[in-house]
Amino acid sequence: MRRRAWLLSAAGAAGALVVGWGLLPARSRLGSPGLMLPSEGAVALNGWIKIAADGAVVLAMPRSEMGQGVYTALPMLVAEELDVPLGRVRLEQAGADTIYGNVAMLVASLPFHPLESEAEPRPFKVRAGEWTVSKIARELGINATGGSSSVADAWVVLRTAAATARASLLGAASLQWRLPVDELSVRDGVISHPSGKTARYSELARFAAATPPGTVTLKDRKDWTLIGQPAPRLDVPAKVDGTATYGLDVRPPGLVFAAIRLCPMLGGSPGAIDPAAALALPGVERLVRLPAYAGSTAGFAVVGRTTWHARQGAQAVEVQWQQRPRGPLDSRRIDSQLEAAVRTEKGFTFYETGDAPAAERQGARTVEAWYRAPYLAHATLEPMNCTAQVREGRVEVWVPTQVPQMCRAIAAQVAGVSVDRVTLHVTLLGGGFGRRLEVDYVAQAVRVAMECGGRPVQLAWSREEDTTHDYYRPMHVARLRAALDAQGGITSLSIKSAGDAITPRWMERGLPALAGPVDMPDKTTAEGLFDLPYGVANQHMAHVATQMGVPVGFWRSVGHSHNAFFSECFMDELAAETRQDPVALRRQLLERAPRHLAVLNLAADKSGWGGPLPSGRARGVALHESFGSIVAQVVELSLQEGRPRLHRVTCVVDCGTVVNPNIVAQQMEGAVIFALSAALYGRVDIQEGVVQQSNFPSYPMVKLAQAPQVQTWLVPSRRPPGGVGEPGVPPLAPALANALFVLTGQRARSLPLAS
C-alpha cells in the first residue's frame, strides 16, 4: 500500500466537511457541571472546574502523574485564566466522559512530514487527516497519558474552561451588584469594584452556575503572570513527607497480598503445578492460575498475609513449564531475520521525494552503513502492581496506570461485569515510560481478587518478573545509504529499517474493538527517519514491519529512541566522509528548517563547540525533533578504564510556548539520565525463550557518580506547547556515539555502547 493511498483512505470520510480541527470550538469539550464529582459545598461550573466552599478551585485531572509534572503544569493553565494563586488549585480524578480523552495524542499519530504539516497554506490531506482523527478522538474519548501530549491537549481546553468559569463568576457579580462587567476586576480569586464591593469566588459560585457566560476571551500572553514562569511543583511536598499515594501505598481494610510467577519462557505456560509445599508455609493462603492476559505470558499467583509470605509461597511452588507452541524465541536469530527483511522485503514507504535510486546511480560515490538497536525493558522504579476487590457484583481497582479507561474495561471483562460496575482509582505512578499503557497486571489482580472471598488483594510484581516479562522496546535494524556528488554534496538519502510494529499489537491488547489489521502501517516504526528536517533533494524512507513474537510496547520516545541514533550517527558519518565539521554540515542542510537551525546554533554556542577541551575529552552533537519539540544536545566525554565517562551535556530545547521552565529543565535532566542508561548498558537478550537480564546487576542503571552536568537552554517561542517528557531522550545516544568516534576513531553502530 502506498503512503498517499493510505492517507487518503484514512481521511476520505472528512470530504467537504473539512475545516481544520483547530477551528472546532474548544467549548465543545467543556462538558456539563454534572460530570464533576459531587462534594459538599462545592459548585461545578463546567466539566472541568468547580469552586469549593473554602475558595479552592478543583480541577478534574484527566492525566496521570509519573514525574513529568502534569499535576503542576495543568493547574497553572487554570490558575492563570481564573486569576487565583497556583496553590489554591486542587485536583480530583476525572471521570470517564469523552471530554477527558486525549485528542492531541491521537492527532499526533498521523504520519505527516513536517514540511507538509507546517506548510502554509496547509495541504488538504493534512487538514483532512487531522479533522477526521480529531473527530474520532473526541467521539472515542480515550483517556491516556502518553506521547508527551498532556499540555498540548489541555492548552486550549483548560484555559477555555477556566476563562468560561471566570466569565460566569464575573457575570454573577455583575448581576448581583447591578454593575457593568467591564468595571469589575479579579485578583487572587476575589472580584472587586472601585466602589469597594468585593466577593470571593466561593460566594458567587452558585449564582455563577446559573449565569451563562458572556463573551469568553483568553488572556493575551502579555498579561500572563504564571504561564512561562518557574513555579514550584505541587506534588513535591507530599512526596517529601511520605503522604503521597503510589500503587503500593494503597491499604484498604482486610487487604491480602499476592505475588506472581510467570513462565520464564516468553509465550510459555505452566503445565503440572504442585502447590503443596507452598500451602504448607505459614501465612500462605491459596494459589490462583493466571492465563496469558493482554498478550502477556501465563503463570500463577500465590496469595499470602503479607508480600513476603506471598513471595515465599510463590517460590516454593513446584511447576513444570511448557515452551510456547511455535518454539523458543532467540534475540540473535531475530537480529538475523531483521537484517534479511531489510535486504529482501519491500516494506512500506513512509516518505519519498525526488528519485533516490537514480541519484545513487548518478552519484560519484555511495556511503552505506547498518545500524542496530536491541530490545529494552522499561525498568520503572515502582514495579507493576495493582490492588483489586471483587464483591457483590462490583469491582474496585487502585492502580498506577496511564490508561484508566482500558483498565476499567479489562477489569470488567475479567470479572464478567459491565464497565459501570467498576470503580477505578488512579494513584501516582513510580515511573511509566510507556509500560503502564498496558493492562496485563490489572487483569491478573482482578482474577486473583475473584478468588479472595470479597477481600481486596494487592498484586505486586518482583523486580525480576518486571524485567523478564515486559513489553519491550522492539529490536530494530536499519540500512542507511547516501549518494555524494564529485564535490561532496549529498544528493540522496535512502533509509530502510525493520522491526516489530507496536501500535497494532497494543490496540489488539487494550482496545480490541478498535484494532485494525496487524499489518497496518505504524508511524512509530519510522518516526525520526521519515520526517528528518535535512534538505536532501532525493529521499526514500521505508520500513518492514515484522512480527517476531516478543511482546513489544511503547518505550519512552518510542521509535525516536532508536531512529535518532541511526540518523544522527549517519549524519556524522557523512560529515567525516566529506571532511566537514558535523555542525557545519547540519547547518548546510537546514536552510528550510529555521527552528532546527536556531536550536543547533544555540547548542553550538552554549557548548563552546569548536573551542578547546581538556586533554582526553571530545564533543559530540545530535539534533532531533519529536513530539512537537526540537532538541539539540552536545555531550562532552572521556574514556575512563576504557569506558565512556560523560562529563557535561548542553541541551537546547524549542518546545513551543513554555508553561513552566523548571519542569522543562527537570525533564531534560531526567531524560539524559534515562537515555544514558539505555545508551551505555541497555539490552535485553533472549535465549531459548528466556530473558537473560533480571535485576539491576544484569540490567544496570546510571548511578549518581556517573551522572553528568546537564545545562538546559530554552528557545523563546510563540508556538503552542510541544512535549517535554520524551524529546530529551533521542539525541543523547547519537551525540554520545559521535563523541566516541572523535575520541577513538571507531564508529559505533550498535547499542549499547559500553559493550
Image (cartoon, grey):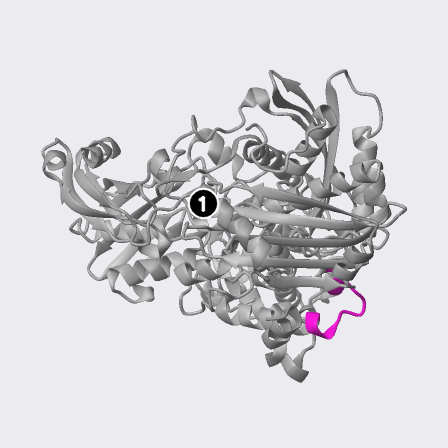
In the foreground, 308 or 239: 308
Q: Quadrant of residue 515?
A: bottom left
Query: What amino acid type is highlighted by mark number 1?
Result: Arg
Whole-percent x, y for residue 728 in the image: 64, 41
Under tag 1, what secondary structure? helix
Whole-percent x, y for residue 281 in the image: 12, 31
Vertical placement of 319 versus 149: above or below? above
Whole-percent x, y for residue 152 in the image: 63, 55
Q: Which residue is mark 1?
A: 333
Q: How many neighbours does mark 1 have within 10 angstroms: few (below 14), some (14-19), or many (20 or more)?
A: few
Q: Does any portion of residue 502 appear in the rendered image?
A: yes
Look at the image and give the residue range highlighted in magenta.
Answer: 114-126
Quadrant containing the C terminus in the rendered view: top right
In the foreground, 232 or 557: 557
Residue at image location 55% in from the left, 45% down from the top: 556
Q: Does any portion of residue 474 appear in the rendered image?
A: no
Residue at image location 57% in from the left, 65% down from the top: 208
Whole-percent x, y for residue 712 in the image: 71, 35
- Magenta region includes residue 116: yes
In the foreground, 179 or 696: 696
Residue at image location 55% in from the left, 40% down from the top: 234
Vertical placement of 688 versus 20: above or below? above
Is 224 on the left or on the right of 234, as rendered?
right
Residue at image location 76% in from the left, 15% down from the top: 615
Quadrant containing the N terminus in the rendered view: bottom right
Vertical placement of 165 versus 613: above or below? below
